[in-house]
Amino acid sequence: MDVKVLSKENIKPSVPTPQHLRNYKISFLDQLAPSSYVPVILFYNNANVVNDHLNKENTLASDLLKKSLAETLSYYYPLAGRFKDLNSIECNDDGVLYMEAQANFHLSMFLENPDIPFLNKFLPCKGNCLEQSCQPLLAVQTSTFECGGRAIGVCMLHKVVDASAMSSFLKTWAKLTHGEGDKTLDPDFTSAISLFPPIESLPIKFIRNFENFYFQGSKSPMRRFLFDSKAIKALKANTSSQSVPFPSKIEALTAFLCKRIASASKFLTNAPMTLVITHVANLRPRTEPPLPQNSFGNILWIPFAFYDPLDASMELPDLAIMLREVFSQLTAENVKGTFELRNHFI
């Protein structure tokens, strides 16, 4: 199996960015985000509704995707710009990278038993890797399969967006591809910087140390685990307790994985004394009042839970209780208090 890149080009916003919007300030949380690309790959088979609309002919499909991407960039104009300094983006409409590729196999061949490292073939750049120089802020690769299926790989710079903002961008692109554009597509560019204003004098060393926190070691292995509905139902039942009678799927699965990691770590030569559970939390619904879901930027926080892997008494319900307690502390009041003190810990 192979994926061959056929072309590369630059896509610019369909409408030039007005002069008064040419300087975009990032928020304090953006400053803390790593200089890495967040990858997303969307797969469409040739019977999919999207491809019925797009794949009349590959040329027409490509033209439509590029046209709607240019329209989307007019809404999300910072993504077509370039970083001017550590705190701001020059929205100069330089554009984004758009690549087209051809796969010499059927989509079903890959999806039946996905090769995780091979996923990089569907991306325009390396995802989840620290980049010294990130240009552009957004890159796209569309890959066509022999069956007529399609993969759309998108890489967006984490320094500018989180997963929620990326999702809003993709939804806007999808709507515009189907000709469903309206004013509700306008992203909110003001909430993040109003609530979390940047620190203009933030030391470069501090930013680098924070990035090293995200990227410790030279390798970040990826694994794929499949849990069917029956297994998840059993896990939720085993994780339930009086304190957390109805654990969520995330709580149950996280507790299960952490319990297994703790068990495996006991056999390591240099077994860790403490293990850390982390999850990214979307702060948009946790502020007062809640921020719009289409708020642009990184509006997230990473709560931590620490536990001793050698503690044999720590069972699934205990781990779920720990997770619930940590996330319950992300209240609007605590979020506000944390960022009012941000100048004191830097």
Image: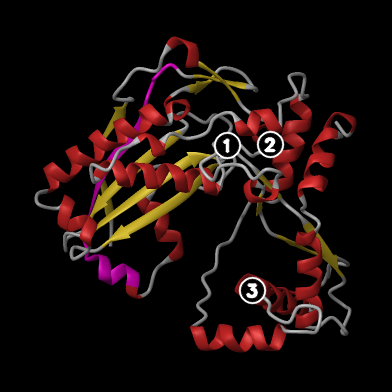
Which residue is located at x 39 percent, y 20 percent? 94
Which residue is located at x 64 percent, y 74 percent? 248
Is the residue 190 above or below the residue 306 in the image? above
The residue carrying pointer 3 sits among few (fewer than 14), some (14 to 19) or many (20 or more) residues within 10 Å by Cα, namely: some
Percent coordinates x, y for residue 49 in the rendering: 21, 60
**Mark closest to the chain's N terminus, 1 or 2:** 2
Which of the numbered marks, if any, corresponds to residue 29? Answer: 2
Q: Gap between marks 1 and 3, in whole Å?
A: 27 Å
The residue carrying pointer 1 sits among few (fewer than 14), some (14 to 19) or many (20 or more) residues within 10 Å by Cα, namely: many
The C terminus lies in quadrant: top right
Q: In this rendering, would 315 be left or right of 250?
A: right
Type of amino acid under label 1: Gly
Q: Gap between marks 3 and 2, in whole Å?
A: 27 Å
Which of the pair 75/104 is nearer the observer? 75
Percent coordinates x, y for residue 118 in the rendering: 40, 59
The residue carrying pointer 2 sits among few (fewer than 14), some (14 to 19) or many (20 or more) residues within 10 Å by Cα, namely: many
Q: Which residues are magenta?
A: 92-111
Type of amino acid under label 3: Ser
Q: Is residue 99 magenta?
A: yes
Indicate the quadrant where residue 201 lies: top right
Which residue is located at x 45 percent, y 23 percent? 81
Type of amino acid under label 2: Leu
**Mark closest to the chain's N terminus, 1 or 3:** 3
Residue lying farthest to the front in this orientation: 289
Which of the pair 238/129 is nearer the observer? 238
Q: Gap between marks 1 and 2, in whole Å?
A: 8 Å
Q: Is residue 303 magenta?
A: no
Q: Which residue is mark 3?
A: 248
Q: Which residue is mark 1?
A: 297
Q: In this rendering, would 20 be left or right of 301?
A: left
